[in-house]
Image (cartoon, grey):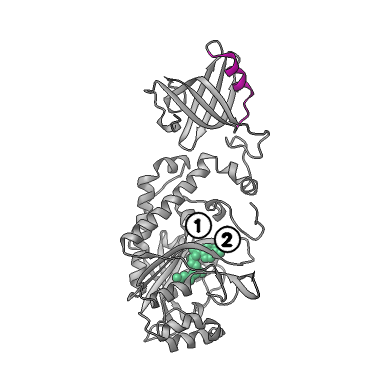
């Protein structure tokens, strides 16, 4: 029976393993193979005097990255990875790899990100790369665990929709029989409708589609959003949930992903300290104005240079709160005493925005007025607006970018590193 490579210890007598040929070295009287499965690497040592000739021939001929089965005796040896090796009695090539390889899995030859993404199946065989996706899986698990234990209900909302969510632009049109349709930018309208349906606490982890033309290291055209919506809550309640969730995700990764963090050779991994500071928008742009050459005025959005300057000043995760109503979406609730600012927030990592959210407008008339104010037509939102006429609890929520969370947690230079098969301005295959 095959066992994972990690379970072959110096104490085992015999073992059978299967995996990819990581490296082959023929030193005349002795040949070495390194065989890799998803749990680790093991050395297969072939002393030519002691091993059957057909095994020697097979080992000599095997190409790198072929899939092999090896069965033999285990010996303790200091110099080999994991302090053990297998002397084969059975050596079978299950699936031969062609050579040359489009990408060097052993990472002796460096490769550009584009080349890596073109051959992602090979790139992801690299332990350092695979580790990112094992950690991303743990992040998803931690989010589910946290939200389920806090009483949130997992929902799934449509990705093919008839109307824009965030304000008309940046939509991918698709052919939907005789109708015009789009890929959804955000589950925003649907998660709010489920508050109208009385679900009180909902979340979804799903794809969002943004037809953004620009090609940056932090934007994707298909991203994954962790979305939450909660009834009878204001922005402060959901901000607390968000920071608590972030910390519990980091803790889970720290606790469960040690070998993957090691494989990535990270400089440092630390759980962020809470509470995250709450920085009012007005103060944030003041910092940006002092620290950058780019002019920034009250009412401007916070661009990349400003984000960087404020991030340097803050040094860790922080919230920007109390945004001007004019630059946040129509669904953000204005303050009663000063409607020019609203109950919206962004969660920031020093490198970039991770999440945005708000307490929402739950009053039908105000919502219609705010939709009009943004130059949008309330009629195209009637499916969304109708629930607001039949009893809508006050509510708040946020959307958190999964890729940005993983990217900032692991210090990845490019968001594409946090996606198996990224979709960007130029990339539609694989
Ligand atoms: P927003 O548009 O700010 O808010 O998106 C929320 C979070 O999703 C991530 N994100 C992206 N990640 C990668 N590439 C993109 N193109 C991209 N666009 C967004 C970011 C961002 O902070 N409906 C609101 C959320 C809410 O209020 O509940 C919304 O979509 O991490």
Residue shown at the point (58%, 57%) measured from the top left: 217
Q: Which residue range is magenta in the image?
A: 51-64
Label at residue 331: none
Which residue does the numbered mark 2 point to in the structure image?
220
Cβ at disc 1 under 8 Å from ligand 1: yes
Position of the N terminus, as image quadrant, is top left
User: Do the residues bearing badges 2 and 1 touch, measured as CB atoms within 8 Å?
Assistant: yes
Mark 1, other Cα within 10 Å: few <14 / some 14–19 / many ≥20: many
Residue at the far front: name it.
Answer: 177
Residue shown at the point (48%, 75%) measured from the top left: 189
> How far apart are the alpha carbons under marks 2 and 1?
9 Å
Q: Secondary structure at mark 2?
A: loop
**Of 167 and 231, the residue lying toward us:** 231
Q: Is residue 323 left or right of residue 54?
A: left
Q: In the image, residue 48 lies at what x, y percent? A: 56, 13
Res. 184 image quadrant = bottom right
Which residue does the numbered mark 1 point to in the structure image?
403
Q: In the image, residue 138 lies at what x, y percent? A: 41, 50
Residue 70 shows up from this direction? yes
């Amino acid at each position: 029976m095959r066992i994972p490579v990690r379970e072959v210890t110096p104490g085992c007598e015999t073992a059978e393993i299967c995996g990819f040929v990581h490296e082959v070295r023929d030193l005349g009287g002795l040949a070495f193979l390194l065989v890799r499965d998803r749990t680790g690497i093991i050395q297969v040592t072939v002393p030519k005097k002691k091993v059957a000739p057909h095994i020697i021939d097979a080992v000599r001929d095997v190409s790198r990255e072929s899939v092999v089965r090896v069965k033999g005796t285990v010996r303790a040896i200091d110099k080999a990875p994991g302090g053990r090796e297998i002397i084969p009695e059975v050596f079978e090539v299950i699936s031969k790899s062609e050579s040359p390889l489009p990408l060097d899995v052993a990472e002796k030859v460096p490769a550009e990100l584009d080349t890596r993404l073109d051959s992602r199946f090979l790139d992801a065989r690299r332990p350092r790369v695979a580790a990112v996706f094992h950690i991303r899986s743990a992040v998803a698990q931690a989010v589910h665990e946290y939200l389920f234990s806090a009483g949130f209900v997992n929902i799934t909302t449509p990705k093919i929709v008839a109307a824009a969510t965030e304000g008309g632009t940046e939509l991918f049109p698709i052919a939907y029989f005789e109708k015009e349709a789009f890929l959804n930018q955000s589950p925003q309208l649907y998660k709010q409708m489920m508050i109208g349906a009385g679900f009180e606490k909902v979340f979804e982890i799903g794809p969002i589609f943004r037809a953004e033309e620009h090609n940056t290291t932090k934007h994707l055209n298909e991203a994954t959003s962790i979305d939450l919506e909660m009834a009878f809550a204001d922005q402060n309640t959901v901000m607390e949930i968000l920071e608590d969730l972030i910390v519990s995700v980091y803790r889970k990764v720290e606790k469960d992903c040690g070998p993957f963090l090691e494989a990535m050779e990270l400089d440092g991994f630390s759980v962020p300290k809470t509470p995250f500071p709450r920085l009012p928008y007005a103060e944030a742009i003041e910092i940006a104005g002092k620290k950058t050459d780019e002019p920034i005025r009250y009412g401007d959005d916070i661009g990349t240079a400003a984000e960087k300057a404020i991030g340097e000043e803050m040094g860790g995760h922080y919230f920007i709160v109390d945004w001007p109503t004019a630059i946040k979406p129509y669904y953000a609730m204005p303050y009663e005493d000063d409607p020019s600012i609203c109950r919206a927030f962004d969660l920031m990592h020093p490198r970039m925005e991770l999440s945005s959210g708000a307490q929402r407008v739950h009053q039908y008339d105000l919502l219609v007025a705010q939709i009009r104010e943004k130059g949008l037509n309330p009629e195209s939102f009637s499916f969304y607006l109708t629930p607001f006429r039949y009893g809508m609890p006050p509510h708040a929520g946020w959307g958190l970018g999964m890729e940005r969370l993983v990217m900032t947690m692991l210090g990845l230079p490019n968001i594409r590193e946090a996606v198996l098969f990224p979709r960007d301005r130029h990339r539609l295959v694989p």
